Amino acid sequence: MGGEKEPQAASTDARIREEGADEAVPAPGAGDALSSFKSKWGAAHPEFGLALTFVPARRRAPQSAFACLAFELEHAAFATRDAEPAAAKLQWWAEELVRAGRGEARHPLSQALAVHPAFASIASVRWYEVVRGALMQRDPEPAADRSALLDVYAELYRPLAAIESDLFGVDAHARSRVAVASRALRETAAIADTLRAGRLPLPLDLLARHRLARGDLVQASPAQAAAIREWLSMLAVELASVPAKRLGVVAAAQRRADRARARRAARAEEPLSAVGESLGRLPLATVWAAWRAGRRSPP
């Protein structure tokens, strides 16, 4: 809906860069801290804050904690500029989540997750697989084509989605696809930072089709705009092809919001500016998607 107005969020992921079970409840004293993480990431991802309002109340704390954990891991993988601090942070998270499985959680997010009855059954090696996937996002080789580029992101999101599936019953494959396409959208929106970090956010065959070199992506030109539009169109198609009925509330809202952002920016005269600006806005159709996913959720 080209003329619809969208609520403006307080901040975006770029601003951040610079700076379950029916009876599951957060650990004593963790509620205020958990709320601060929800506020932090809800400001960067407005669809997340919206989605939480449609998650059944008794499931909200562990599901919001898991989503915030995913955001924290993403931040370390993609937005922490120096490799050593990023690796240290990711290793700390792996150790903390293993400790949480033994009933020794210290962080508010792991405390909120640890009360989930299935949490202790997550094998330690699976958290280390997530960390390995996050570390693989640091300075990867340029991808030859669309599938190869999305496969790189999937090294992080596939094991993370598998854990989310075990905890909350979502479809792991569908969840991973949404997370991968959403990350590709954000890597494109922050293209200068992405390139500076050693990552190429578009596949090589797309650059070749538009006769662009890596350095051309930060220079506005008709060829650059055409390549960005084509890539955003691919991401919109990828998100549209994921069955919404197989997603939880948070992922359903993410899918709908990022699909709308990619489609709209792909039609814009300046697609790179359009997609960057869109991340802080909430497409209105996201409300409908979150509501429907909430109705499908167990009480």
Image (cartoon, grey):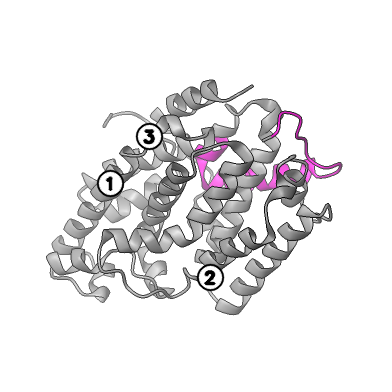
Q: Label 1, on which residue?
A: 265
Q: Which residue is painted at 63% across and 46% down in the image?
A: 66
Q: Is residue 13 visible?
A: yes
Question: What residue range appears in magenta?
Answer: 21-50
Residue type, numbered disc 1? Ala
Q: Earlier in the sequence, mark 1 or mark 2?
A: 2
Quadrant location of the N terminus in the rendered image: top left
Is residue 156 highlighted in magenta?
no
Compute the Cα span from label 3 to label 1: 22 Å
Quadrant location of the C terminus in the rendered image: top right
Q: Secondary structure at mark 2?
A: helix
Instruction: Tell me if mark 2 has few (under 14), some (14-19) or many (20+) residues whose alpha carbon lies within 10 angstroms of its own.
Output: many
Nearest the viewer among 290 and 170 is 170
Q: Label 2, on which residue?
A: 135
Left of 63 or right of it: where is 185? left
Does 49 sit above or below residue 220? Answer: above
Residue 64, horizontal then vertical, whole percent: 64, 40
Does 218 sit above or below residue 280? Answer: below
